[in-house]
Image: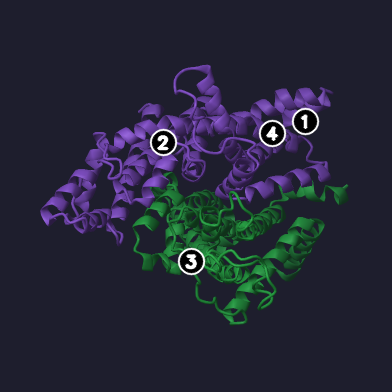
Chain colours: A purple, B green
Amino acid sequence: MHWVAKKALFSFFTWFLAISISIIVIVLSPGDPAYILLTGFLQQGMTYDQAMKMVQAYIGFSPHEPWWSKWLRYFSGVVTGNLGASITYRVPVAQLIAGAIPWSIFFVSYSLSITIVVGILIGLLMAYYRQKILFMRSISTVLTIFNSIPNWILAAIFFVYIGARWRLLPYTGPHSPDVQPGLSLQFIASVFHHYTLPMMVMFLTSLPGWAFSMSAMASAVLKDDYVLAAKARGLPSRRIITVYVARNSILPIYANIAITFAWLLVGTVWLESQFLLPGLGSLLSVTTGSRDFPVIIGVYVIIITAIVLGSLFTDLTYGLIDPRARVEEI
Amino acid sequence: MNISNIFSWLRLAFKIFSKSPTTLFSIFIIFIYVIASLAVCVNLVPPLPPAKGGWEYIYQPPSTREFPWYILGTDFTGRPLLLAIVRGIPSTLAIAFLAAVITVSVGVVLGLASGYFGGMIDEVISMVINVALVIPTYLLALILVVILPAELKTNVFVLAGVLSITAWASLARAVRAQTSSLKRREFIDVAKTLGFSPWKIMFGEILRFMAPFIAMSLILAMTSAIYGYTGLAFLGLMPMSSENWGVQIYMAIRAGGALYSDKAILALWSPIITIVLLQYALINIAKTMEEIFNPALRAGLLVGEEE
């Protein structure tokens, strides 16, 4: 079999198992969502038959089925694009998610692109000046401090101070309320302006990871023979670091972009809800408050799908860069 | 490992720890947290007074009453803030430690078995690891915390299980890779010829080589569990207990008016500093351990005296 087909098949199988196991864990745990929905509807004064029908309509399975039948019904819904209906918004979950995805993609790409550029630069500097102990120690201390601040704490601090108290940057909503959404320059500028503060949070909390792995990768390359040979030939250090080190250490880091992208989607649960932005994360955190299970599980399924696609893309990119990765065991 | 070997390790560890002031600081921080937990456990710290609702009791300014517990004022329930934070240390550390032990045990056992036995066992376990790798721990934990009944959410063991639910996957993958390369070494052949059982080889011989790596993973797993425990509370998904630092931050912003007034400013910053100090100390110690056990990284740190 062609290596691309093989990887794709493997990803599909992983996706199938990951979704199935999660759904089975969720319906088997004490507090099956279908039961919670049923008791909710009964408390609203519905008759038992009515309530059962409502549960069926919203989440796609009823509380009294065995677990495998719940799984089968929900999973067939996932495959056909029917994720049930939202209880709070009274619209199909798929429609809610489709409206949220572009915002989250924009937010994560905006932050990630800046993080990658700065992270690679800092990583290269750290690798090149690793002998300068004072420089190394101070930069790595600062990065470790940012590494130890959870993103939701930094979001809360920025929200309270830079946003609400000092009013340096907009801190609520995706764009200014006076701007009409559309493809105008004014609207785009307003969106970028409103996403600056959330982007800074995601940038600062994910920068250490990129800088540290870039520096590790570049330090390994710096010890390679061809770098030694280049030094021995008396090439200027700027040329060594840009042409010899950067190019060869950026490639493996670059291949990780897709998978990191998917993982950053998880972080939007905290960031988007803090800054009242639309998107997958805020959809999830809003619906946990109202226990809107069709939406909660729907967003979960979408994020796992994104992670699987991200890993597949990463695998394929590795395969293109490095032919050895094509045959390697998976 | 013989005595002189251990001795030289200790000397190297001492050298690295003492040359790096941030590491000494981190050890000092962890020491304080551990002392505080012990003090709570042996009842040296008074129990939390009952909650007092009403605007005149909550978010009071600092006072020297019942020194030192009111020195940071009161929290959203009218209880002394410092006392609530100190009483939160043992439960947070216990959940973090338990979650880390679960993460590391599951990761090590699956990784060892998969890497050592190979074949069919490896295929099956690798599949399990790959599936767990794509399930984000915080996301599944978030859903479970929403659907679990309240009495289970306050149970330390349930919470630790939820926070480590798929967190073991990357460790299992790393252990698997190391095991399959270690098992080709000669001393394993010797052990096999001597008739050692597979369990003895895995846990006695192979695991010993990975001990530093596993200790480091344990510390990093603790930081992830603390992140999840306080982070889920910040989303308002945990029981509204004074002893969870995430709940304190959540309430300071949502109910204390930290946005516009200075009334809840201490209730906002005290739990933040408590969390960040703990996370910083743990991450920093894990990094220093990496430097001790990985000679390639050590070079940068000790280069001054090697030359």
The chain letter under disc 1 is: A
Instruction: Choose the circle earlier in sequence order: 1 or 2.
Output: 1
Name which residue lies at 55% across and 53% down.
B253
**Secondary structure of the residue carrying numbered label 3:** loop
Helix or strand or loop: what does disc 2 sit on? helix
The vertical placement of A82 against A296, above or below, is above
The residue tagged 4 is A221
Q: Classify residue A100 by image quadrant.
A: top left
Residue corresponding to mark 2 = A306
Labels 4 and 2: the sequence-earlier one: 4
Q: Confirm whether circles 3 and 1 share one chain.
A: no
Q: Which amino acid, mark 3?
A: Ser
Hey, which residue is sitting farthest left in the picture? A49
CB atoms of marks 1 and 4 within 8 Å: no
Which mark is nearer the camera, 1 or 2? 2
Q: Is residue A13 left or right of residue B16?
A: left
Real-space Cα distance between discs 1 and 2? 41 Å
Where residue B291 appears, as percent x and y from the top left, is 71, 52
Q: Are marks 4 and 3 in contact (CB under 8 Å)?
A: no
